[in-house]
Amino acid sequence: MTMQQERYDEVERLMRESLAQVEKDMSEQDRTGVAEYIDFGEYGVAYELLIYVLDKQRIAHPASLTVAGKMMGMSS
């Protein structure tokens, strides 16, 4: 496994962990949307959508989401 692949795997793990921590507070449509982007490796889009939903509902960002964002060069 390459260093790049390990990084993607870690970002995916962090994104899934973040979604799992807040999914009970999200609509099924939002939850499904974020999960589908993660499934297709669109981590940046999943990140932006999750941030948008959490901010709209005034839900705190999980620490794992912040770490994933930093790994992708994004910030929450």
Image (cartoon, grey):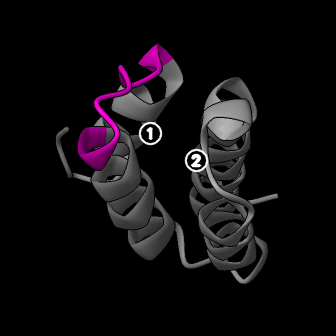
Q: Amino acid at mark 2?
A: Val
Residue name at image x 26 percent, y 48 percent: 56
User: How dense is the environment of label 2, judged by Cα within 10 Å: few (below 14), some, or many (20 and up)?
Assistant: many
Q: Magenta segment, which residues?
A: 55-63
Side (left or right) of 70 relative to 23: left
Label ID, residue 35: none
Label ID, residue 68: 1
- Which secondary structure type mostly characterizes the magenta part of the structure? loop
Quarter that holds the N terminus: bottom right
**Front-most of 42 and 73?**
42
Instruction: Kindly indicate whether the residue at mark 2 contacts the one at mark 1 (C-beta within 8 angstroms).
Output: yes
Mark 1: which secondary structure? Answer: helix
Residue sitting farthest toward the bottom: 40
Residue tagged 2: 11
Residue name at image x 40 percent, y 28 percent: 67
Residue name at image x 44 percent, y 16 percent: 63
Query: Which mark sits nearer the N-terminus, 1 or 2?
Result: 2
Q: Is residue 58 magenta?
A: yes
Q: Does the rendering let one see residue 14?
A: no
